[in-house]
Image: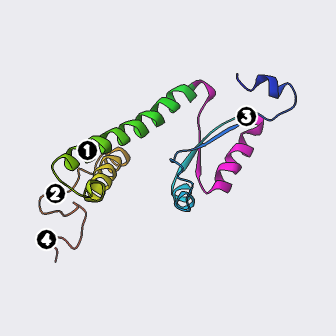
């Protein structure tokens, strides 16, 4: 691989990729603590890569070397499409006179993404039912 010349000089080859978009601000620390990091390394040094991810505050997830290209494509797809959708939507709203389209869309976009992620995490959850109550909400309409 790309690190082979360095490995031949004694460098330990490992990759740790936090699945967040870094801003350079303190919010990155919160996002690291709530996120995951892909780790790739030879079996003998994999625990080092996992420990580095944990030190960053992330949950390590092992990605095989052969799967790194697919992983990178998945991350790029999520990042690029999210940005493109927000940019297109804010542009349309700005075009019809909205002063702060990003602020207007913020809750909608976040809740839509959270909903999509919830469906991926828990396929049995079928979203918000009529009236805005989660199916398992014990305090919802009809609760005793």
Labels 3 & 4 near each other (Cβ < 8 A): no
Neighbor class of circle 3 (other Cα within 10 Å; few <14, some 14-19, many 20+) is few
Neighbor class of circle 1 (other Cα within 10 Å; few <14, some 14-19, many 20+) is some
* N-terminal-most mark, 1 or 4: 1
Which residue is at the front of the view, 43 or 32? Answer: 32
Q: CA distance from mark 3 to mark 4?
A: 53 Å
Q: Which residue is mark 2?
A: 129
Specify the label residue 91 is tagged with. 1
**Circle 3: element type:** helix
Q: Which residue is mark 3?
A: 43
Q: Is residue 3 left or right of residue 16?
A: right
The residue stretch that appears in magenta: 44-66
Question: In the rendered image, which quarter contains the C terminus?
Answer: bottom left
* N-terminal-most mark, 3 or 2: 3
Q: Nearer the viewer, mark 1 or mark 3?
A: 1
Q: Which residue is mark 4?
A: 141
Neighbor class of circle 4 (other Cα within 10 Å; few <14, some 14-19, many 20+) is few
Q: CA distance from mark 1 to mark 3?
A: 48 Å
* N-terminal-most mark, 3 or 4: 3
What residue sits 26% from the left and 54% below the top? 101
């Amino acid at each position: 691989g790309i690190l082979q010349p360095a490995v031949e000089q004694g460098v330990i080859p490992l990759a740790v990729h936090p699945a967040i978009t870094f801003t350079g601000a303190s919010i990155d620390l919160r996002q690291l603590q709530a996120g995951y990091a892909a780790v790739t390394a030879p079996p003998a040094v994999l625990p080092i890569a996992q420990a580095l991810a944990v030190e960053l505050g992330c949950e390590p997830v092992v990605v095989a070397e052969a799967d790194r290209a697919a992983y990178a494509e998945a991350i790029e797809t999520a990042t690029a499409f999210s940005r493109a959708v927000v940019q297109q939507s804010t542009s349309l709203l700005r075009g019809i006179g909205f002063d702060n389209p990003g602020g207007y869309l913020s809750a909608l976009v976040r809740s839509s993404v959270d909903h999509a992620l919830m469906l991926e995490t828990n396929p049995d959850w079928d979203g918000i039912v009529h009236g805005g109550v989660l199916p398992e909400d014990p305090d919802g309409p009809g609760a005793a």
